[in-house]
Every structure is written in C-alpha cells, then in structure tokens.
Amino acid sequence: MHVEAGLRDIEAFTAYQKGIKLFEEAHGEIEMLPGLRAANDYFDQVVERVPQFAAFYSFRSDFYVHLMNDAVFVGPGGHFEVGDVSTAYERALENYEAAVRFSQSPSDRLKAELDLAFVEGNWRGLDTRANRTLAIDDCEDGNWLTTVVNPLGLAEQYIPFAQRVLACDPLRSLSWFNLARANLWAGNSEEAVRVAKEGMQNARGGWLEWIFVRALIENGNFEEARTVIDTQVRDSEWADAGRVLLAAKRGNAQAAEAALAALDFDPETTIFGPLFYAWTGRRDDANRLAARFDTHPWGPWALWQTTHWCACGHPFDLEAAPNFARAIEKSELPWPPESGRTYPLKDW
C-alpha cells in the first residue's frame, strides 16, 4: 500500500501501518467487520496525534459503511450493535468530509470528493467525477472508484488507472483484484484470467481467488474453474458462489438448484442472495430481496453494490426497488449497466 508523504509522527505512522494491514486483510482474509473495527482502533490513534492527515479517513470510514451494508443484507439481529448502526451513516460522512477537507493535493481531493458524493447520495454528475479522477496519475484509487466506474461503463478507461495503482504496490492483492474485475467488466475475459492468475502468484487473497474463478467461468474454462474452486478457494462461501455461477453459466438449471440447495449459509442474509437468484433466473426471488433491501435507508447504495458484484446487467427489476429507482432517475445516469455477458437461465 502506498503511504503518503507527510506523516512524520513515528507513533502515528506505526498505528497507520498496522491499521492499513488490518484493513487489507478485512477484504478477503479475515472476517470483515471485526477486522475493520480493529483497523479503526489504530486509525483512531492516528487522528488523536495527527488529525490533519487525510490519507486514513477514507479507510476509517469503511467500517461504518460495512455496518450499514450488514444492516441491509442481514437485517435485525445481524453481526452489529444497534448503537453502532444508528450513528454509522453520520460517522461515514464525517470521515469522507474530513478526507476532503484535509486533502493535500488535487488528486487526493478528487478521489475524496467522489467517495463523499457516492456515499451521501449525490449521484448526479458521478460519471464526470469519475472521469476526472481517472485522468490523474496516482498510487491510490480511493474507496468507491471501482464501484462507480464499472457499472457506469467506464471499465476500459479505468484499466490504465488500475495498472498504475498496481505498479505502485504489486504485493497488494486488492489491486490485482480490481484490475482483473475491470477487465471482466470491459469484456476482456482472457486478460482477466491472465491478470488474476498472475495476481494469485504474487499476492494471493480471498477476493482475488473469487475473481480468478469468475474470470475462468466467464472465459468458458469450466473444468479449470471447478478445479480451482475445489482446491484453491479457501473461503467456503466464495467456493459455493463459484459452484452456483458455474452451473448458471452452463445453463444447467438442475445443477444450479442443487448448488443452491447445498449452501451451508442463508444467501438471503448476504449480498449473495440477489446475485444467486439473478444468475439462476429466479426473478421473483431476486425482486423480493431487492424490495426488502430497498426499504432500508442505506438500501439504494447497497443495491448499487449488488449490481456491481453481480455484473449481470440488472439483477432485479427497478420496479421492485422504488427508492433505488428514484435515486437512479434523479442522477440521470445510464442504467442498467451493460455487462457484456449472458446468463442462460436469466431472461431479463
């Protein structure tokens, strides 16, 4: 991970490095919410000593964003405390606003402003913000740039940016993941396989294992994908997701239903639920989940993320999620995303 110049307080620098390590591990290597909470314990030490240091604020916000995601997907009685969730949105915005306020360069400010605009629901002009950000030469990509650019049809433009970020730190697994996923969104499935395979050799991580499987499946390398699922994917939920997607891409409804029946977790309490239902053509179920998620104050943002992770066009009908639909209409952004991929069991 690239470290910004200017953090000259040794104790703050040490805490920042420890926090970044946990932040990275929380995205694929360890349980997310406890990992991000532990990372924030270190980031809190940084803010006490060097509150004007902008670089850590967007990382610090991620815990609060994922608390809100958990509240949407899991619902009451999830993996969070009610007190945490009640203030999560406010805390997330506070951190993004601080990242903007303390930005020390135009490029940092562009990234921070895009993150803030996405999280606060200011989606009008998000494509313009994204294009301006993609034009900078930097070693960081912010929290939400990839989530924004791929559904907006900017994956091809993002690829050179992602390559520059990766060159700054080839040992960062998330950078390999982002580059491979962008190639998938851009329709470059062979290149996505190549990038993910090279990444697995240099900086293996849980999310990278998943995108490697997905790239193989999207490229038609079904048998290799099955082998990787069975032998290399360490997280059981990601392995199960691979089996569902593999059956769906083959158009095998019976195998897809068997893969869903074999799950040892409830997909309706995770982001996987609408993805699974979309890939396997269960439109009514996908819409039912989207409608449930949409009733939450954070629902529209969670449904944007769902669409990004599905990479299947629209995983649900807009009519099923009126709050999300209104947010999209107000933004005047193109929707649904063009995924460039087909799913034989999905007819919408």
Image (spheres, helix red, strand yellow):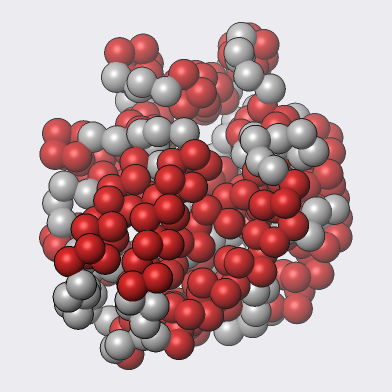
| Closer-to-camera residue (256/38) | 38
Q: Check the image and report above or below for 256 versus 339.
A: above
Image coords of residue 36 (percent x, y)? 46, 47
Residue 178 placed where, x, y %? Answer: 34, 52
Q: Is there any visible trace of residue 153 in the rendered image?
A: no
On screen, 36 above or below 275?
Answer: below
Residue displayed at 59% across by 72% down: 93
Quarter of the image with the C terminus is top right
Position of 49 with respect to 171 (left or right) is: right
Total labels: the figure holds: 0
Residue drawn 67% across the image and 73% down it:
121
Residue 179 place in picture, x, y as percent: 29, 53
Quadrant where the image shows the N terminus: bottom left
Q: Nearer the viewer, residue 47 or 177?
A: 47
Instruction: Give above or below for 227 relative to 19.
Output: above
211 lies above or below 258: below
The image quadrant that residue 60 belongs to is bottom left
In the rendered structure, the answer to whether residue 232 lies left or right of residue 36 reads left
Residue 236 visible in this rendered orientation of the protein: yes
- Image position of 110 (left or right of 323): left
Q: Residue drawn 26% across and 66% down? A: 12
The residue located at (84%, 47%) in the rendering is: 291
Q: Which of 319 and 171 is in front in this view?
A: 171
User: At which x and y percent is residue 273?
Assistant: 67, 33
